[in-house]
Image (cartoon, helix red, strand yellow):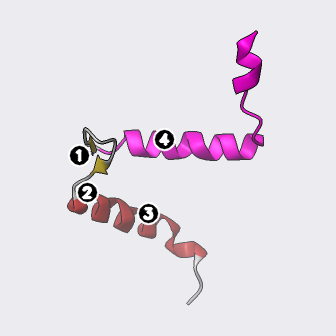
Amino acid sequence: MSWLFWKDKRPAWVQAEEREFIKAVNSLQTLQTTPGGGMRIDPEELRDQILESREMYKDLVEK
C-alpha cells in the first residue's frame, strides 16, 4: 500500500523525456561515477556526441 505515496505523478511526456535522457547517458562509454555521487565523462566522447547530433539535426536550422 505504501507504493501509492511514491507513484510518479508527472505528465507522461516528462517521464518519456527522462527515460530518453537516461537511455542516452547509459550509452556513453566513458561515463564514470565518483564515490561522492558525481559523474565524469571523457570530453572527447562528449564532443563527438555533440558533433554527431549537430549533423543529424542541421536540416532543422535555417541560416
Residue annotated with mark 4: 22
Disc 1 residue type? Thr
First in sequence: mark 1 vs mark 3: 1
First reached walking from the N terminus: tag 3 or tag 4: 4
Question: Which residue in the protein does label 2 denote?
Answer: 45
Along the line of sight, the residue nearer the viewer: 23 or 3: 3
Question: Which image quadrant: the C terminus?
Answer: bottom right
Q: Residue 41 location, x and y as percent?
A: 26, 52
Of residues 19 and 4, the one nearer the viewer is: 4
The local secondary structure at tag 1 comes to loop
- 5 sits left or right of 22 in the view: right
| Dot 2: element | helix
Kindly state the secondary structure of the residue where label 3 is placed.
helix
Q: Position of residue 6 (x, y in %)?
A: 69, 25
The residue sitting at 73% across, 46% down in the picture is: 13
Q: Are marks 3 and 2 in contact (CB under 8 Å)?
A: no
Discs 3/4, front: 4
State the residue at coordinates (62%, 47%). Answer: 17
Q: Residue 53: which numbered mark, if any?
A: 3
Residue identified by numbered label 1: 30
- Numbered range of the magenta stretch: 1-28
Task: From this view, report whether residue 23 is shown above or below residue 53.
Answer: above
Q: CA separation, marks 3 and 4?
A: 17 Å
Q: Classify mark 4: helix, strand or loop.
A: helix
Examine the rendered structure and indicate whether residue 1 appears above or below residue 51.
above
The residue lying at 50 percent from left, 74 percent from top is 58
Q: Which mark is residue 42?
A: none
